[in-house]
Amino acid sequence: SRAEHTETQCSKTMTAKRDILCLFDIDGTLTPSRLVIKPEMKQFLQDLRKIATIGIVGGSDKAKQEEQMGGDATGMYDYVFSENGLVAYKDGKLIGKESIKKWMGEEKITVFVNFCLRYLADLDIPKKRGTFIEFRDGLINVCPIGRNCSQEERIEFFEYDKVHEIRINFVKALEKEFPDIGLKYSIGGQISFDVFPIGWDKTFCLGLIDVSQFKEIHFFGDKTYEGGNDYEIFVDPRTIGHTVANPEDTMKQLKELFKL
């Protein structure tokens, strides 16, 4: 484990200096997927913030993140990185914002979206709902079942996708159709995948942090396997990566790491 050597460092740094930064994925790491953070986890993070600097980084926009995190995230955490850090806040203030629309241009976007819509139309899956393509500032989110499916339908699709690899095959089709467009595809959560320029993954947020002020930067995520949306930041040499199974496991690992 990449985290093995860090226990002694962390236990030595239990001071008010907060010179250890903990970055967290949201879905599946701090909250059940697309559900609201549990009160005990919310309180635990506030307690942890007394001894460590806390940041959240996810693919969702700020509104969705705050819905999940139960309030004004920029007031509760030191760093809030929405859309992988393409919309970034530090100490409650906006410190960066990128635009995929500007980067791609309307012509490329139209060709890309048209291909996705044709692919979705021909896709044979048990259920389809609505909002299949969602534009955010820094990425495009593609959802085969449609983002306004119910929680029950979300879980249903997730289990179906595990067997039939709907999202994996969709990504393969896009890579084949657009080999030179400079886009990367990242499967995260339960029902969708993100599309963004190469380099605009979760490691983007690290470029907005003054890494010299921290002894260590720890990242906690559940999709840390290759192709998962936590992979790049998990293996980045600037971070110490931790794979978690669920929010309860995240809390357990933090308690061990910080001797809480």
Image: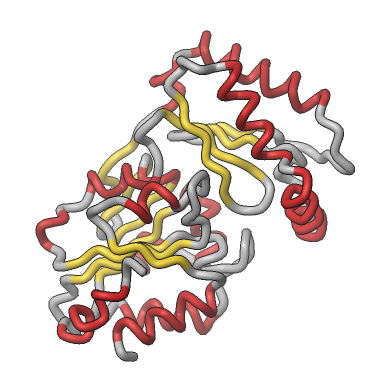
Task: State which quadrant residue 28 falls in.
Answer: bottom right
Quadrant showing the C terminus: bottom left
Looking at the image, which residue sits at the far right? 126
Q: Residue at x 45, y 66 (%)?
A: 243
Q: Residue at x 54, y 81 (%)?
A: 39
x and y percentages locating residue 85 in the rendered image: 36, 45
Quadrant showing the N terminus: bottom left
x and y percentages locating residue 102 in the rendered image: 40, 20
x and y percentages locating residue 10 in the rendered image: 22, 80
Q: Residue at x 26, y 49 (%)?
A: 206
Looking at the image, which residue sits at the far left? 212
Task: State which quadrant residue 4 falls in.
Answer: bottom left
Q: Residue at x 29, y 63 (%)?
A: 240
Up/down of 43 relative to 68, above or below: below
Residue 198 in view of the camera: yes
Task: State which quadrant residue 14 falls in.
Answer: bottom left
x and y percentages locating residue 209 in the rendered image: 21, 52
| Coloring applied to the structure | secondary structure
Of 59 and 186, which appears nearest the observer? 186
Looking at the image, which residue sits at the far bottom? 260
Looking at the image, which residue sits at the far top? 107
Q: Is residue 259 left or right of residue 32?
A: left
Of 209 and 220, which appears nearest the observer? 220
Task: Give the total of numbered labels.
Answer: 0
Residue 60 in view of the camera: no
Up/down of 207 relative to 52, above or below: above
